[in-house]
Image (cartoon, grey):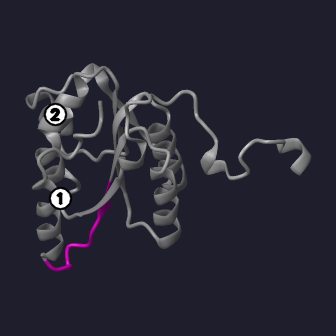
C-alpha cells in the first residue's frame, strides 16, 4: 500500500478537495443539536429571518422529516423563497441521518434542518465527523418528552441570542 501512495500525504485529512472554495472557512460549519418540546416550531420562528436570507443565495434549504406544524406558512411569511426549500421524507432514523449527511456535504445546500428522535452517542459521533466536511449549517431538532424540566428552553434561547446563527455561510 505504501508504494501506491507514493509521495501523497498519508492522512486523509491532508488530502485536498478541489471542489471547495478557497474563501469559505470549512472548519466552522457546526451541526447544532437542539432539544425541542414544540416539534421545532419555536426554533423555526427564531431562525426564519436567517433562513429567508439564506434562501436568497440560490442554494437549498433542506428540511428532513418536518412535522405538520405549519412550517410552510411560517417560512413564507418570513420571506423565505419557497422554490429554494427542499423537503425530504425519510422512512427511518438511519435514512434520516444519511440524508442529512449527504445534504450537508453536497455543496448545494446552505442549511439543513432535521427532525428526529433523541440521538444516541454513536449518532452524535457520526454528526461530529460529518461536521468536519460540512458545506452547510446543520440543525438537528430532537424531540424531548414533555416531562423534562424547562432548562432546555433556556439553553435554546442562548443559541438564538447570537448575532447571526448562519453568518459563516456565503
Front position among marks 2 and 1: 1
Residue 25 appears in view: yes
Q: CA distance from mark 2 to mark 1?
A: 20 Å
Q: Position of residue 42 (x, y in %)?
A: 13, 53
Residue under circle 1? 159
Residue 11 image position (x, y, % from top left): 68, 53
In percent of the image, x 35 and y 52: which residue is there? 30
The location of residue 54, given as percent across then percent down, is 24, 30
Instruction: Tell me which segment is drawn in magenta.
Output: 140-149
Image-quadrant location for residue 49: top left
Give the residue pinned by disc 2.
75
* Along the viewing direction, whichever of 67 and 27 lies nearer the viewer: 27
Is 161 situated left or right of 97 in this image? left
Please, what secondary structure does the residue beneath circle 2 have? helix
Q: Is residue 95 left or right of residue 110?
A: right
Could you tell me which residue is drawn at 17 percent across and 30 percent down? 52
Mark with earlier residue (2, 1)? 2
Amino acid at each position: 500500500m505504501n508504494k501506491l501512495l507514493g509521495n501523497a500525504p498519508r492522512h486523509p485529512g491532508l488530502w485536498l478537495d478541489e471542489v471547495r472554495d478557497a474563501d469559505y472557512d470549512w472548519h466552522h460549519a457546526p451541526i447544532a443539536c437542539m432539544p425541542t418540546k414544540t416539534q421545532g416550531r419555536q426554533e423555526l420562528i427564531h431562525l426564519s429571518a436567517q433562513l429567508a436570507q439564506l434562501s436568497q443565495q440560490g442554494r437549498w434549504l433542506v428540511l428532513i422529516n418536518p412535522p405538520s406544524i405549519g412550517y410552510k406558512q411560517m417560512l413564507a411569511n418570513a420571506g423565505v423563497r419557497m422554490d429554494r426549500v427542499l423537503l425530504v421524507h425519510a422512512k427511518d432514523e438511519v435514512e434520516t441521518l444519511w440524508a442529512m449527511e449527504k445534504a450537508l456535504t453536497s455543496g448545494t445546500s446552505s442549511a439543513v434542518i432535521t427532525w428526529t428522535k433523541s440521538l444516541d452517542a454513536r449518532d452524535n459521533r457520526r454528526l461530529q465527523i460529518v461536521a468536519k466536511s460540512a458545506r452547510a449549517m446543520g440543525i438537528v431538532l430532537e424531540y424531548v418528552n414533555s416531562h423534562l424540566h424547562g432548562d432546555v428552553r433556556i439553553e435554546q434561547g442562548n443559541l438564538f441570542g447570537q448575532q447571526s446563527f448562519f453568518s459563516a455561510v456565503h
